Image (spheres, grey):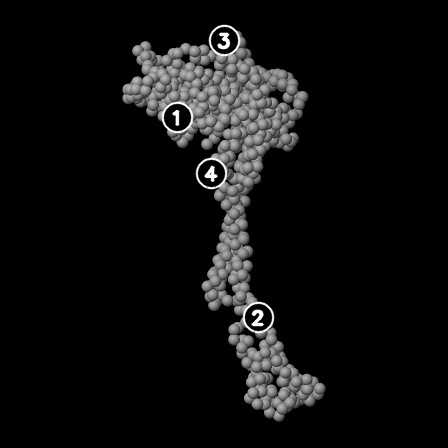
Amino acid sequence: MSVLADQVRKLDAHLDNIIYASITNSRVHPTNEVAAELNTVLHTPRVKDLLRIIKALSATTGTRAVLPPSQLQFLLTQSNLLSDRPHEELQLSQHESDLEWLLVSKAAVQAYGVVVDTLLDQIVPLSDHIWYWDYVLSSPLSTTLYMIQTSPGKLWIWFSEVYEDSKARLQRYTSGNAVNAESEVTHTNTAVPSLAPQWRRFYAIVQSTILEKSLADVRRRMLSPVALCRAEARRKQARLKKVREMTASGLGVLIDEGFAFSGIGADDGRSDSELSLPNSQEWKGVVERTVALMDMMLHDVLDLDLSTNQMEDKVFAAVAEDALCVQAEEDDRDRPVVVAKRLHALLDEQLLSNTVRARRLVTKHGRPSRLVRYWLPATALLLSSTTILRIFVNRKEEILDWVQELGSTIRDFWFNWVIEPIRKVIGTIRHDANSEIAIMSQDSLRADRESLERMVVDFAVDKSTTATGASSISETQVAEIQAKVREGDVTPILRAYEKDLRRPFVGTVRGDLVRTLLIQVQKTKVDVEVAMSGIDSLLKSQELVFGFVGLTPGILVSVGVVRYLLGTFGGRRGYAEKRKAGRCVRVLRNIDRIFSEAAPTQTNVLTYKDHGFLIAEVHILRQLVHEILPADIEKEFSEDLNDLANLRGVQYQQRALDRIRWAYSKWLK
């Protein structure tokens, strides 16, 4: 829903209040008479048709607030108000006349929405065209590019003009010599004149035409082509700005002066039922005046020879002198027919004429077509297409191999770095024995420790005197030695080792020193395995963490690639929302600029032109935030936008703009 839709629905509801209050006014008709007359009137075929069309014209019954012009014209035709009535049908009841007035009033509201919507559609794209000329004027390179883009068209126009001028001169020359040619044929009886003089004459005519055009266009000879293009860009940009100002002024006039019922323009918090209801002649005159205002505005809004103030004065003067408004003082029951015919003519002629004129102005002064802007790269691509095709054909095998290797690489990455780590993590969670991390075998430490115990016990038994200082070792001492070995204590071996070191040669010959050294090597091996067992236990306790660490690189790469592909080829919702949020900020900047440069009237409201610009920016902002804000927030945003567009005063509107900035900054970043 837009600001225009809100305005149309509000006007439609206000018209319902006015007409139904006038139909059921108990002060004019007694209650029983009103009931009896209404019961009789509502069952007539004419009233049923009117009520059906009125329902179709109501902005509150359909999903669309504004009907298309073709459907609106069709409903007006169905109402039989466009055809001339016989004299006997002019004797209508008061209720039928009121229903006809309600029908044409609702049709006028719909036409009002169509006209305002047309002006909005015309003014919104003009900013893009004006920005294009800013880009052309931004640098000499941009101007040169524009000159290259438009040079084929300008050359074609120049050749066409030369051809037409030469053709006209040649026709005059041929017609002037026709009589002489006939007399020569009569006297000499020859029918095959020489073609060489004619070609020489045509060449001379073309040469003189080119020379005259070169002499006539002195400005082109004095300025460079780039300077001429810059002047052309400035001229077209100025015309587009004039079109935008005129359209904004017309839009502001229609918004401010259209359907200016007493009480409806001031949004003071009252409900529709509390608004003042004017008398029948007053509201009918407002409808007639609005129809005339739309007609005159469509006729003069694109008259670029006038200034905005002159256009406004001309429209208001024409409305004041309009015959339809002069007839507003008369109580004529045929006035709905006149209003309906004028509405039909407005939709059928004036609206179409205005649209065609606006399209021609944009085509003439707007940015060039896509064909003009992109013919250069398209031509380069077309000329190089054979070379590109030849490269693809000559390197077909390499390209196919590259594609296959790329696919194989992607497949291996997916299975080795994503699927396999996921499978290992799942196995770890389920305590799969095959998935446990193991640096050493589970029985290795036990076997080496038992071997060390046997070595130490055997040495202590064989060399009891050296190991323990006793001649023999009991079973209790053997068990004690085994317990100490399990704790890492090999004191008997160290005592014998220390003793043999005093006489190493003897110990070596006897073999005790070598034996103790080998037992210590086994002890070192057991110590290393104990340390490895601790590390192994630590790894097993953090096995799930290591599984996720191994899975993280593959997941990060996969997510990054998927997000890039989605952002490039589809699913650009987030990117589109960011772009729309950026455009919303620029629209708010434009609104602030309107208030900064505006010159308020004596009543402290914006002029028609500034208000038209404001309505256009609010219309764009309302459309942009539809997919950015949540539904409940959008409702509050619409209320603030209505406060911003309402003519209560410049200070009130600026406060509404500030409120929009801080209240919705979260979504408009």
**Residue indicated by mark 1:** 58
Q: Earlier in the sequence, mark 1 or mark 3?
A: 1
Q: Amino acid at mark 3?
A: Glu
Q: Is residue 306 above or below residue 64?
A: above
Do the residues under discs 4 and 1 have CB atoms within 8 angstroms? no
| Image coordinates for residue 605, horizontal then vertical, percent | 56, 23
Which quadrant of the view contains residue 137? Answer: top right
Q: Which mark is residue 534?
A: 2
- Label 4 SS: helix
Q: Is residue 535 left or right of residue 259?
A: right
How far, Cα to Cα, is label 3 from label 4?
87 Å
**Can you say which quadrant of the picture contains the C terminus?**
top right
| Image coordinates for residue 613, horizontal then vertical, percent | 55, 26
Q: Earlier in the sequence, mark 2 or mark 3?
A: 3
Q: Residue at x 59, y 90 (%)?
A: 473
Q: Amino acid at mark 1?
A: Ser
